[in-house]
Image: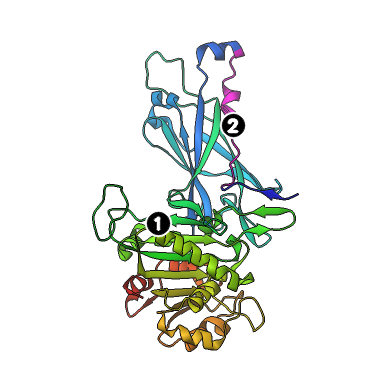
Amino acid sequence: MSTTLPRRTLLTTGAAGTALGTLAILTDPPAHAEQNDRPRSRARFDLDAEVLDGGEQVVSLTIRSSRLEAVRHTSLSTDTFSVHVRATSPLDGSLAYEQDRAVTSARWDGSRSIVLGLEHGEGVEGASTLLYTQDRNVLLDLEYTITQDQPLATTERGTRGPVVLDSFVQGDLRDPEVDSFTHHQVRGGLKYRLFTPSPGAGPGRRNGGGRPRGRRPLVVWLHGVGEGRLHTPEHDYYDNETTLRANRGALGFATARAQAIFGGAYVVAPQSTSKWMADGDGFAPMIQAVIDEVVSRERIDTDRIHVVGCSNGGYMTLKMVAENPREFASQVPICSAVSEPGDTYYLSDRTIRAMRSTPTWLVAAETDTSLDPYRNTVRFHELIDGSIMSLYPTVEWDGYEYPGHWSWIYVARNDPAKSGRHIWQWMADQRR
């Protein structure tokens, strides 16, 4: 049976953690005494997420309750609460993982909120919000359980004892970077996410409507194969979420650092209805329709539209320039490839040579075993006069080595450089 999921995979609601935990063993009053002496306390908590280079992870939980106002702040420690997670596939409900999460920090955020930091980072199990299945990333259904293991001492005189939260109700998955991109869909076309620059960024001043004043550049991010729609006889998953949560490709251009370099830029991330390489001829006008819609609605400087993409999106970057040779101020194909004649993502050498009029910066890693960098990136560099190429020996960041195909990490971190000028600065300097 076909399962069409909503715009955003809903988190399990009503997930409640039972309070007391080991504390229930230490303090075991009769039911009537607990009912009379201690008011029942319910707390809500949200999942705080962050997109790392390897994908989005839940990095902390924020607990909120009015009962926390009476708590002595020094009584909170990393041993006060324990956390458990159960993650299931949104496609069929199968278990992806289930385990305890290590609480690494506990701090106050105001008088009614506690933030529990959770162990996270590349290679840490049980932290991811995504499941990679059938060559696609899908947003997991996450059910978190919090248990209070130790009481929280109060500051009030005459209170009925320490604060013990009886139940915990799960709220939202919050990721400020991802949530800053709004949801859209071209009528009869592609879904896309859009970041709008701050009115205070770049040239011009804030206007009455709060929108950027003065025309701004637009960065078009084209994702890889894992972020496209999953459409099979059993499932139809098209969520407009994984394009931002699977890596930092689009998010990098929305950071304060990138926005300062570009003088405030719009960032648009269309989502393929399959994979770009499956139908380059068909997808090129669909992506152009997304660009045209953004240009018609926002204050875009059409001389500063940049197209950037990785893997499948690297091919699609080249394809967009081939189809619209006068459209883009620059192109950045990352770990890209084209096929042999007759396949769905073929571009001839002659077509690639003709791209010399569009400023081009190619990025790949020598250890890429998915798409041969010498057959593709190096060859494209040789074909496109004046192009720049950053060919890394491996993909490594902050001491962690990633698969060689993941060279988009470098672009998302503004690492590629030539003669002291980094790739974002180079892009920001280009005009059509």
**Is residue 80 visible to the viewer in this orientation of the structure?**
no
The kind of secondary structure element at disc 1 is helix
- Residue 81 vs 344, above or below: the answer is above
**Spot occupied by residue 150 in the image (x, y as percentages of width and height):** 51, 29
Secondary structure, magenta segment, majority class: loop
- Residue 50 vs 313, above or below: the answer is above
**Spot occupied by residue 261 in the image (x, y as percentages of width and height):** 31, 65
Q: Is residue 295 left or right of residue 31?
A: left
In magenta, the rendered stretch is 8-31
| Identity of the residue drawn at 44% across and 56% down | 194
| Identity of the residue drawn at 56% across and 59% down | 189
Report the disc number at residue 138: none
Q: Which residue is mark 2?
A: 16
**Spot occupied by residue 242 in the image (x, y as percentages of width and height):** 55, 56
- Residue 133 vs 103, above or below: the answer is below
**Spot occupied by residue 93 in the image (x, y as percentages of width and height):** 70, 45
CA distance for labels 2 and 1: 43 Å
Looking at the figure, which quarter contains the C terminus? bottom left
